Amino acid sequence: MPVYRYKGVNRKGRAVAGLQDADNPKSLKESLRGVGVFLSEFHEAGDKTEDLDGGRRGRTTLFGGVKSRDVSEVTRQLATLLRASISVVDAISMISRQVENPRFQRILNEVRRAVTEGKSLAAAMAEHPKVFSHLYVNMVRAGESSGTLDLVFDRLAQFMESQVRLRSKLTGTMTYPLIMMVLGIGVVSLLMIFVIPRLTAIFDEMGGQLPLITRVMISISEFFQAYWWVVFGGLGFAVWLFNRFRNSKTGRPRWHRFVLRAPLFGPLIRMVAVARFSGTLGTLLASGVPIITALEIVKNVLGNVILEDAVDEARVAVKEGANLAEPLKRSGQFPPMVVHMISVGEQSGELEGMLDNITTAYETQIDSRITILTSLLEPIMIVALGVVVGLIVFAVLMPMLQMNEILKQA
């Protein structure tokens, strides 16, 4: 069944647009007229635009990516609609009409069509792995098996919303230092490339011995003017070389181990990984996913090969009959408090609830650590930029002060 992209006007006179599947254009018109939409333009998705009068004109549609926030919002809406006893097909149909992202709207219509044709919701979503992750699909499959799809979507929505909030906080923390760094490099580059050379000519006319700091600044400025392409080319090559090392089989574990041990940021990165581990595992177990499968999924969302290896070793140990806490403790990669709480949860049969407690505790610690880092980074960046600019200004002013003293003595 083809999917049509349409534009029209509703009963209130407002312009509407969206995607709709139909057997043919006539069926499309009747279907939309039934929901109060009067068609003005339509075309088959991926084809050219067709007006109602039969005319055709070329049109290029650029589809953007689907953001995690968009998936999170749709998941929350699915949980609400399913809780109200609305069928999966109808719920997806209602939501797809409200989605603004054209690509996501098309994907939701494809999922709905696949479910209508007899596929399970999990299988339909699995056909779009760039939008619905392995974790997402497995939780939906568990929800379909247990008949608790509304609860699964509710848990998924909570989990994704917490991940979006965490990502936003981390991004916000790094934005200010990066802006300050870019501004600092820009200011210094302008001074070294444009200001210092002009002042050099003045200093040459003055004669006499220039201060050491001024001579150093002039030498650096002349080097940048003559070999700027070497500097930027070298930086680009260094970045490429570093990325190649970081992604290599031997370099990746070394880099990830260094990241976890790095001062200031290392503890925060470990906290984020632990919160992601406990939150994802708790959500999967509460949704009915077996622990072996859950650990396999969790391993792929940590983003650190050292922690991934620790979780994989724990998965193998659990598969052989061990509890989860013991192999995590042996790895040395998880804080003692986390291991102890997991052990208590296993002994009491409340592992899911204990994992939720770990997630809550670590998210609170992450908020606190981000606040501290932000308060430290801002003055550090300001002072560093001030020192660099101050040195340049000092190097410029010192010869001027010397010239002023010579003129006074004359």
Image (tube, rainbow, N blue to C red):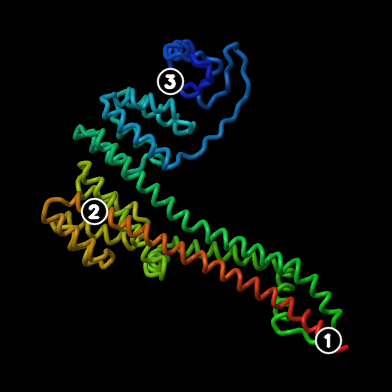
Label number found at residue 357: 2
Quadrant showing the C terminus: bottom right
Q: Label 2: how many residues lie within 10 Å, few (<14), some (14-19) or many (20+)?
A: some
The residue most toward the front is 408
380 relative to 271 in the view: left or right: right
38 relative to 210 in the view: left or right: left
Q: Secondary structure at mark 3?
A: strand
Label total for image:
3
**Mark closest to the chain's N terminus, 3 or 1:** 3
Label number found at residue 406: 1
Quadrant showing the N terminus: top left
In the depicted structure, whether residue 107 falls above or below residue 39: below
> Closer to the camera: disc 3 or disc 2?
2
Residue type indicated by callout 1: Ile
Residue type indicated by callout 3: Asp
Give the spatial CA distance, label 3 vs label 2.
45 Å
Residue type indicated by callout 2: Asn
Give the spatial CA distance, label 1 vs label 2.
73 Å
148 relative to 378 in the view: left or right: left
Disc 3 + disc 2, Cβ < 8 Å: no
Q: Label 3: how many residues lie within 10 Å, few (<14), some (14-19) or many (20+)?
A: many
Q: Which residue is mark 3?
A: 21
> Closer to the camera: disc 1 or disc 2?
1
In the depicted structure, whether residue 305 falls above or below residue 130: below
Q: Secondary structure at mark 2?
A: helix
In the depicted structure, whether residue 306 falls above or below residue 300: below
Tell me the residue at 26%/33% (across/down).
150
Residue 349 x, y percent position in the rendering: 12, 51
